[in-house]
Structure formats: structure tokens, C-alpha cells
Image: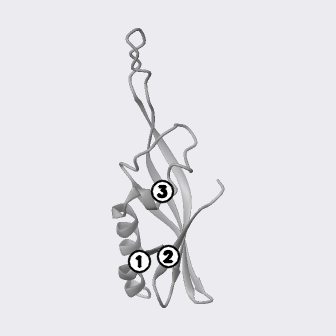
Amino acid sequence: MMQLITVLNAWGTPAFEAILKHEIEQMDAALLPLQQGLSQSSYTDGANRSVMIINVTAGAGFIRAKTGIFYTGMIPGCSCADDPTPMSELAEYCEVQFDIDQITAETTVTLLAG
């Protein structure tokens, strides 16, 4: 489980959403459910990621942030000698929820149905 300590420390400040957005954009793509969120392609490395904060609420000891993540997915080509289909890149989008514990900063990441 990851900890978003910088985000928790920014809670209640005007910079909170900007810090949350930055932390998500900079984190290892393997920590995010981007592969599971693909709808048009078959693979992603999480490149070209951009985050939109949809809403943020607090309650019961946690901060819940609903985000929209835009990223690039790929459809790999065959690479066969007789069919040199190039790799295609497609825009992808998924909604991801971050539940941040207000004491430990431990964060649960959930792909939301879209």
C-alpha cells in the first residue's frame, strides 16, 4: 500500500488539489489500475498521464478523492515480415478513487466503473 504523505500534509490548504494531481502524475504507473481501465487499446505503460480532480470529500478518518486520468494506450502491431502493422496509440480515460487515511496517509486506489 502506498502512502501519500505530501498530499495528507497539504489537506486543508489551497494547494491540496494541485499537490494531489502532481503526486498522481508522478507516481509509478504500476501503482495505478491503468491497464485494467483500458477501453480502446490493449496495453499501456502509463505514459502521457494527465490527472483531473473530479471531487474531494473527507469523513470517517479518510480523504476520498475521485479523479479522472487521461493516458495513452497502445495496440501493438504484428511486426510480421508480411504484415508490418505499426503500433497505434489511442487516448484512454478512466476514473480512479484514492482513499487516504488521515492519520497514516496509507492510500487505497480503486478503479471506478465507467
Q: Which residue is mark 2?
A: 107
The kind of residue tagged 1 is Leu
How was this image coloured? one colour
> Of marks 3 and 1, which one's residue comes earlier in the chain?
1
Residue in the foreground of this view, choosing between 1 and 34: 1
- The residue depicted at 44 percent of the width and 21 percent of the height is 78
Residue in the foreground of this view, choosing between 4 and 56: 4
The kind of residue tagged 3 is Ile
Label 1: how many Cα within 10 Å (few below 14, some 14–19, many 20+): some
The kind of residue tagged 2 is Thr
* SS category of the residue bearing label 1: loop
Q: CA distance from mark 2 to mark 3?
A: 17 Å
- The residue depicted at 41 percent of the width and 72 percent of the height is 20
Residue in the foreground of this view, choosing between 80 and 84: 80
Callout in the foreground (3, 1)? 1
Residue in the foreground of this view, choosing between 50 and 27: 27
Q: Which residue is mark 1?
A: 4
- The residue depicted at 42 percent of the width and 12 percent of the height is 83
Callouts 2 and 3 close, C-beta under 8 Å: no
Q: CA distance from mark 2 to mark 1?
A: 7 Å
Q: Which mark is residue 69?
A: 3
> Of marks 2 and 3, which one's residue comes earlier in the chain?
3
From the viewer's perspective, is 9 left or right of 34? left
Q: Is residue 57 above or below residue 84?
A: below
Percent coordinates x, y for residue 59 in the rendering: 61, 87
> Of marks 2 and 1, which one's residue comes earlier in the chain?
1
Percent coordinates x, y for residue 25 in the rendering: 37, 61
Label 3: how many Cα within 10 Å (few below 14, some 14–19, many 20+): many
* SS category of the residue bearing label 2: strand
Percent coordinates x, y for residue 84 in the rendering: 38, 15
Quarter residue 95 falls in:
bottom right
